[in-house]
Amino acid sequence: MKNTLPYHFKTISEYHRFRGLPKPEHPLMSVINLDNIRNLPTDGQSSWIFDFYSIALKRNIDATVKYKYGQQTYDFDEGIMFFIAPKQVFSVETQGDYKLSGWMLLIHPDFLWQSPLRKTIKQYDFFSYSANEALHLSDKEETTIISIFQSIKQEYTSNIDKFSQPLIISQIEVLLNYSDRFYHRQFITRKIFNHTVLNRLEEILKEYFNQDSLVESGLPTVQSIAKELNVSPNYLSGLLKTLTGQSTQQHIHEKLIEKAKEKLSNTNLSVSEIAYTLGFEHSQSFSKLFKTKTSFSPLEYRRSFN
C-alpha cells in the first residue's frame, strides 16, 4: 500500500530503530553497513525526511531488482552515491522485497558544531542535487570511497576520547572532497548527456532572446532554465562550470549581451527601448551589465559602428 506521508526521522536513533539496527554508538553520527539492514517489503513509493545529513554508497545484491529515484531507474550494478541534506524530501520507488549492500553515513549538524565543516559542508553543491543526478562510481573510485567509510567506522567503534570527533570530521572532509572530484569526472565523462544538455541550453536561450519582447516574460532565470532541462540548478551550474568555465547565469548574460549588441548595431532603437525589449525594468541596470561585460557603455558600443 502506498505511503502518503513522508517518513520523518528527527534523530539518528529513530532511524536505527526503524531499520532494526542496534542503538548508534554516538547519538549525533552513525556509520551503517547496509548489509546489516533487514529485508523490507516495498510499499510502492515512499518519501523520506531526515533532520541530519545522509551520505550513502549503495549497491544492490540482486541486480534484477530496480530502484527508482526521481525520474531515473538504477540497477546498482556499480556503486552509486547519494547526498541528502537535512530537511530535504526524497522519494524511493521499489518493486518487491529488497536488500541493499553498501554504506551509509549519518551526521547530525550538531556533530559538526564548532568545526569549520559546519559551514563549509553547505558549499558542496551535490547536497542539493536531485536524486537522478547521483554520483556513479567506477570500480577504482568505489574502492577509495569504501576505504574512507571503513576508516570512519573504525574510529566510530573505538573508545571515544578527545581525538575521536576531530578525526572523524577530518575523514568526512576527505570523503566529501573525493566525492567532489568524482562528480567533476562525471561531468566530463557523461558525454552523450552533457552534449544534449549543452545543445538544449543553447536552443532554450536562443528561443528566449528571439522573442519580439521579453517585457512580459522577463529575463530567464537559472531556476527556469534548469527546470526546462530537467536538472537541478546547482547540478546545471556545476556541469557548465566544468565543461565551459561559465555558470548558468554567465551563459544567460552572454546570450543577452550578444542580442544587445545586435540591436545596438542594427537598429535605431534607443538604449532605453533596447533595455525594455530585453526584459529590463530600468535601463540603468542594462547599461551597467553591458559595460561590465564589454567594457563599453551601450552608446560607446553603438558609436564604434559609425
Image (cartoon, grey):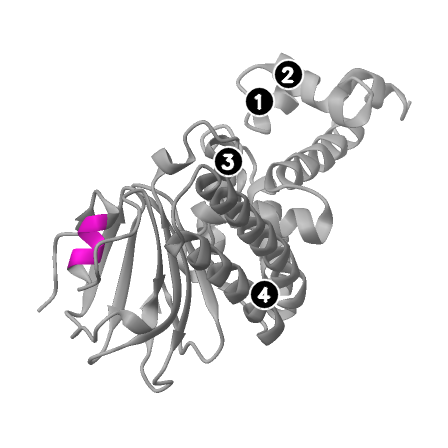
Q: Which is closer to the viewer, label 1 or label 3?
A: 3
- The secondary structure type at the circle numbered 1 is helix
Give the residue at x 83% y 22%: 301
Nearest the eye: 34 or 288: 34
**Magenta region: which residues?**
13-17
Residue under circle 3?
117
Q: Which SS class for mark 4?
A: helix
Q: Position of residue 192 (x, y in %)?
A: 62, 70
Mark 2 Cα shell of 10 Å, populated few (<14), some (14-19), many (≥20): some
Q: Residues within 10 Å of mark 1 (few under 14, many from 20)?
A: some
Q: Earlier in the sequence, mark 1 or mark 3?
A: 3
Placement of the N terminus among the 4 image quadrants: bottom left
Q: Between marks 4 and 2, how big is the CA–CA gap?
A: 57 Å
Q: Is residue 282 above or below residue 141?
A: above
Picture layout, residue 206 above or below residue 219 = below
How far from the left and from the top, in percent, is residue 169?
Answer: 49, 43
Say which residue label 4 marks: 144
**Quadrant, the C terminus:** top right
Q: In front: mark 3 or mark 2?
A: 3
- Residue at mark 1: 276
- Above or below, 153 relative to 297: below
